[in-house]
Structures are given as structure tokens and as C-alpha cells.
Image: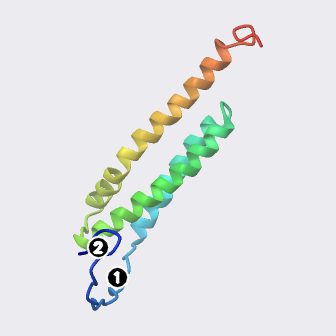
Amino acid sequence: MHDVYDPPPVPEIEWEEPRREPLEVSRGDVACLVGLCAALFGIAAIFWSDDPFVAVIAAGAGSLIVLESWLTALARFKRTPTHGVRARWTVFLAALVPWVVGVGAAVAFLLGVFWVSDHFLTNASFPL
């Protein structure tokens, strides 16, 4: 009798390494990546004067999100070739929208918490 701690023997399975399929990157794809990152860093620079720490975190996390979404879109183009510029930009933006909304909400929440703590929570409110 076999159980979880003493499993039955498993036969050897032949495994072939999958072949590599490189992603095809066009100049327009790179321009899209550069444009999205430039917009992200521009927005972070605007908020730098308000809170540099949040601006750096948002720019760092945002750049990773842009890169991940860009690579996801390129993988989709590999599976279903899309040659129109408008269609490619639509896929790039569709991959980014959920992340932009989520990170934007998180940054807005953090800035709101910092604003409330600066304006309403003073040392007199919390005596030690």
C-alpha cells in the first residue's frame, strides 16, 4: 500500500527542451517603450517637489510595469501577428491600463495619507 509519504514509483518521462523563439522588436515597438517610460518619468518629475520618495518609488515600479506590459504585448504579437501601428498601440495600452489604474490609485492613496498626516495630525493630537 502506498500513501503520500511512500508514493509508488513513477516511470521515466522523456523530455525535450523547447526550442527558443526570439521576440521580433520593431522600431515602433521601441519608440512605444521609450515614449511610455518618458511619460512616466515626466509625471514622476512633476510630483518630485511634493514628495520625492513617492516619486522615486512610482517611477521605479512604473518602469517595471511598463517593461512587463511591453514584453507581454510583444509575446502576443508573436502569437497573433499585428502589423497596423494603431492595432499595436492599442495592444500596448490595453496591457498597461490595469497597471496604470492600480499604481495610480496606490500613489494617490499614499499622497493622501501624507497630506492628511501633515495637515491634521500634529504632535498635539498624539501626546506621548
Residues 31 and 74: in front is: 74
Colour scheme: rainbow
Q: Earlier in the sequence, mark 1 or mark 2?
A: 1
Name the mark nearer the viewer: 1 or 2.
1
Q: Quadrant of residue 77?
A: bottom left
Residues 65 and 18: in front is: 18
Q: Which numbered circle lies on residue 21?
A: 1
Which element carries disc 1, helix, strand or loop? loop
| Residue lying farthest to the right in this orientation | 128
Residue drawn at the location 31% of the way across and 68% of the way down: 4
Left or right: 4 with respect to 54? left
| Residue lying farthest to the front in this orientation | 1
Q: Quadrant of residue 73?
A: bottom left
For the residue carrying disc 2, how many other residues have a C-alpha within 10 Å: few (<14), some (14-19), or many (20+)?
Answer: some
Q: Quadrant of the N terminus?
A: bottom left
Q: At which x and y percent is residue 83?
A: 25, 69
For the residue carrying disc 1, how many other residues have a C-alpha within 10 Å: few (<14), some (14-19), or many (20+)?
Answer: few
Residue drawn at the location 45% of the way across and 34% of the way down: 105
Residue on which the image places disc 2: 78
Q: Amino acid at mark 1?
A: Glu
Look at the numbered discs 1 and 2 and tell me whether their residues touch, using CB distance below 8 Å: yes
Residues 85 and 73: in front is: 73
Which element carries disc 2, helix, strand or loop? helix
Total marks shown come to 2
Residue drawn at the location 35% of the way across and 67% of the way down: 74
Q: At which x and y percent is residue 88?
A: 30, 61
Q: Quadrant of the C terminus?
A: top right
- Residue 23 vs 100, above or below: the answer is below
Residue drawn at the location 56% of the way across and 31% of the way down: 110
- Residue 1 vs 48, above or below: the answer is below
| Alpha carbons under labels 1 and 2: distance apart | 9 Å
